[in-house]
Image (cartoon, rainbow, N blue to C red):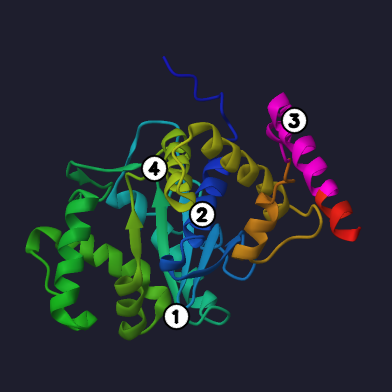
């Protein structure tokens, strides 16, 4: 039986590792990432990780981690929990709307290691909710066809879920804002857990730096993980965004030159040839002077 009381800091490390994954991705010039920030003060609820792209977009991520093997359901997304008067979707919608004041092209994302549910469920008021992956796929496809909120016509079996979802988006006021939020919203459930995420970053290091040595990959990863204390805490002042030059600065190593290969004793015959040649040159020079 698993002890879920142990590893209580897993959610914090998971959040940092998600950001670190994007920091590594930033080192690939083809990624288009300009900078990465941890815990951005100006975008509450979408502030865990912010990825700034060179084309002006910003991916604003809410990270949710669990050690228990439970699924993420549609109810988890659109119904208030016992600890809150608002739903997760509503919180993200409000954060997105507020965040637009400071991040004009904010793309909201939910990143979680919780798997998407596979079964239909019923709420307290007897509403039938489909599995989240199924509903989300159907909604995304319908949005591409519709072009605006009024044009979305989901299957009647999804009617209760769609109605409740729209109720949660009432905080956005206009249909244009609701549609724009849903169009940009990304749900990344079934993401790698903490251990798998670290393993993937080792592989990333191998690709980016072109090395297959596991010891080198581990050394680079450990240096990056150690850098989190500077990028995520108040040590040496809170860093707003991490840029590639900041990463390379943290990765810089003192070059140690092994010169033992240059201290090999040359063979004795080389000295004999050198002395003989030196004598010949000396005699030739002396005779030419006389």
Task: Give how far apart the Cα atoms at labels 1 and 3 are.
Answer: 69 Å
Residue 37 appears at what percent x and percent y? 60, 63
Q: Nearer the viewer, residue 211 or 158?
A: 211
- Does the residue at mark 3 contact the one at mark 2 (Cβ under 8 Å)? no
Helix, strand or loop at label 4? It is loop
Which residue is disc 3 drawn over?
Answer: 272
- Residue appearing at x 18%, y 60% in the figure: 137
| Left or right of residue 283, residue 117 in this image | left
Q: Relative to the observer, which residue lies in front, 2 or 191?
A: 191
Q: CA distance from mark 3 to mark 2?
A: 57 Å
**Lower position in the chain sequence, tag 4 or tag 2:** 2
Can I make out residue 276 in this image? yes
Q: How many marks?
A: 4
Mark 4 vs mark 2: give the one in front: 2
Q: Badge 4: few (under 14), some or many (20 or more) residues near its Cα, within 10 Å?
A: many
Q: Quadrant of the N terminus?
A: top left
First along the sequence among labels 3 and 2: 2
Which of the pair 105/114 is nearer the observer? 105
């Amino acid at each position: 039986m698993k002890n879920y009381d142990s590893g209580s800091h897993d959610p914090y490390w998971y959040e940092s590792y998600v950001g670190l994954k994007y920091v590594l991705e930033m080192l690939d010039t083809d990624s288009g990432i300009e900078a990465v920030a941890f815990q951005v003060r100006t975008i509450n609820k979408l502030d865990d990780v912010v990825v700034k792209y060179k084309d002006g977009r910003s991916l604003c991520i809410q990270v949710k981690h669990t050690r228990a093997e439970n699924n993420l359901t549609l109810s988890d997304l659109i119904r208030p929990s016992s600890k809150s008067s608002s739903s997760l979707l509503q919180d993200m919608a409000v954060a997105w709307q507020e965040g637009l004041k400071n991040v004009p092209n904010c793309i909201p994302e939910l990143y979680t290691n919780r798997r998407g549910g596979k079964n239909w469920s019923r709420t307290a008021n007897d509403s039938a909710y489909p599995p989240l992956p199924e509903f989300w796929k159907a909604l995304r496809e319908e949005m591409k066809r519709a072009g605006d909120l009024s044009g979305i016509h989901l299957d009647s079996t999804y009617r209760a879920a769609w109605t409740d979802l729209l109720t949660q988006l009432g905080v956005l006021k206009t249909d244009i804002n609701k549609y724009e939020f849903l169009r940009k919203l990304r749900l990344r459930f079934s993401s790698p857990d903490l251990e798998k995420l670290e393993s993937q970053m080792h592989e990333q290091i191998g690709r980016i730096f072109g090395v297959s040595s596991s010891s080198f990959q581990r050394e680079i990863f450990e240096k990056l993980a150690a850098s989190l204390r500077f990028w995520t805490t108040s040590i040496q002042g809170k860093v707003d965004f991490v840029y590639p030059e900041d990463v390379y600065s943290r990765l810089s190593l003192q070059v140690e030159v092994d010169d033992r290969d240059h201290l090999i004793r040359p063979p004795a015959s080389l000295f004999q040839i050198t002395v003989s040649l030196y004598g010949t040159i000396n005699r030739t020079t002396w005779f030419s002077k006389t």
